[in-house]
Image (cartoon, helix red, strand yellow):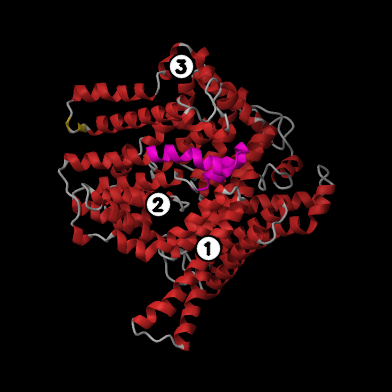
Amino acid sequence: MSDSGNSPVIPGSQAKHSWLVLRLISLVAIGLSLFQLYSAGIQPLGLFYQRSIHLALIMMLAFLMFPVFGPSRPRGVVGWLIDLVFFAGAVITGGYLVLYLDEIINRAGFWTQTDIVIGCIATVTVLEAGRRAVGLSITVIGVIAILYAFAGARGELPWLGEWLPGILEHRGYGLDRLVGQLYLGQEGIFGLPMGVAATYIFIFVLFGAFLEITGAGKFFIDLAYAATGRQRGGPAKAAVIASAGMGSISGSAIANVVTTGAFTIPLMKRLGYRPHQAGGIEAAASTGGQIMPPLMGAGAFLIAEYTRMPYLEVVKVSILPAIMYFSTVYLFVHIIALKKGMKGMSKDELPQMRDVLEAGWHFLLPLAVLVWLLVQNLSPMRVGYYAILTMLAVAVLRFVIWMVFVAPKQGQPVTASVLKLAVRNGVLKLLEGLELGARNAVAVSMACAVAGIIVGVVGLTGLGLKFSAMMMSFSNGHLLLALVMVLLASLVLGMGLPVTVSYIVLITLVGPALTSEFGVPLLIAHLVVFWYSQDSNVTPPIALAGFAGAAIAGSKPMDTGFQAWKFAKGLYLIPLFMVYNPEIIMGGPWPLLVWTALVGFLALGAFAAALEGYLFTRMSVPVRLVLLPGSFTLVNCAFSIDFALPHLRSSTFHTRPSAPWRGA
């Protein structure tokens, strides 16, 4: 469990914890996972009960896992005192709501002094837990949001309002009003982001943790090598496919890089890819895992909640864009292999498809059950619960088959000691999965909690409407310029915020403008913002996934980041394609859908060929200069229409027929 060694993949393992702290981490983490399984599959709880208990346990875990002075320094007496104070704050934050929820609801809006004090404790505790689990930047942004709420003539800090630009001015709010919004209301800390984190996200993170500890990562990698290893640039293509497989169940692009990159990057380098190319390919492919259904990091659940659409619908419409993205990365890999005359790996170096499937077929069964239950329109939380039970049942079934049929043929006696050892190892594996799932969920849950503070302030002050007015003013009514502004804003936010928080904040600020002012359908607006929120993983100077790939490849971080940025160009182009061709998301006649998809693939292929300067043979500079803008023209002629005749913009979105599967 906790003391299994220091691993960069396991959150909180970098600090040197004492035996007692390791046991406490295991106890709280396993308790949290069991609570989530109970509420997901046995007895669902009320909204505030579920969210408050979840957040309290998550913060308790955060303060145990991440010492106040960082992982490289011992806690010491002062550190322990600070951690104990915040640990108590975590207990109070959740416990007060659980014990006094009925009284709090009855006096809604007329808060007592105790309510305000507890709310202040909760807000400070959440900000500190967010700093430890996610990073200082998210806490700084949360504090800035609170100061902004206080700034104004009627606020706690009226002098601060004098420094605000005219468009950002507001009346200002007092401590009681803000605390009521952030802690005691449904639009703050315990708002929609925390609701999604406390239900859908956690149960699927737990599902991914069980897959991880049972060896699903190696299975996906072997499967990818068996499928593509003998082709030109085989290891790089295997990296793309394996990252798609792992990313579909993983919640982190960086963890995906570390998991699959440890196998794929050395082989890419051996085949002839330069170190910074190998790291960039892995980073771009792993980032794509965050837009790959069914999980899409945490995005699919958040989008479903925000748009009030069934989770299955969000997953269905996300499949084609994800395939387009991975096809683009795959094509980049193939073009580089052609340019350098690379060959594939020999048959002797590769696993056989039959052997891989024989050894790992059981990993596909829980995924099949997951998809089947989603199609049956079960709640995603209940689907995750049954998927976990299926995985555990399959593990037991495999052991029974080995014990009854395989062991006797191999001459291995099945004695009582063998059974006892197998049961012991199975229980330890189960506890390890429960603990790992809780550890993996800490960062995303704390990100959602601090995002709740930001969203609460935005709702209280009307900042979202102010941003809408700013977008209209700066873009002069041109949709393309507005989308470029969203892209730049996502890049700036991504420098300090994780992907999930960047998406939540950005959609809160610019979503109303995209939908009401520019006529972008609600679902497409959310998908565009979510896709753009991924760019901090592959865009210098941050490029977090690129830097992780550089560490494995032994290359310069910035060079690797620029390679990842090049290979991940689909991250910027495909959202534009969705906006100007809404039928691929909103639906339309099948001939139109097929034609639009074909045009999209051609545009992305032309763009990749123009960047690499190779298509069947080396391309001259003039041809590349013609092909590059030509690829944009293929996306849709609405680019030119939008600039020349912006009043026609609405017809792009409101005259499309409905999808055949929607019963039109």
Foreground pick, 152 / 181 = 181
Marks 3 and 2, how far apart at CA: 38 Å
Callout 3 touching callout 2 (CB < 8 Å): no
Q: Which mark is residue 543?
A: none
351 sits to left or right of 500: left
Q: Is residue 387 covered in magenta? A: no
The residue depicted at 48 percent of the width and 88 percent of the height is 416
Point 59% across, 39% down: residue: 144
Q: Position of residue 260 (x, y in %)?
A: 35, 55
Q: Residues within 10 Å of mark 1 (few under 14, many from 20)?
A: some
User: Label 3: which residue?
Assistant: 642
Q: Amino acid at mark 3?
A: Asp
Label 1: which secondary element? helix
The magenta span reads 297-324
Q: Residues within 10 Å of mark 3 (few under 14, many from 20)?
A: many
Q: Which residue is mark 2?
A: 245
What's the amino acid at mark 1? Thr
Q: Does label 1 or label 2 sit earlier along the sequence?
A: 2
Q: Nearer the viewer, residue 581 or 646?
A: 581
Q: Circle 3 sits in a helix, a strand or a loop, which is it?
A: helix
Question: Was residue 300 drawn as part of the magenta stretch in this picture?
Answer: yes
Residue linked to disc 1:
390
- The kind of secondary structure element at disc 2 is helix
Does label 3 or label 2 sit earlier along the sequence?
Answer: 2
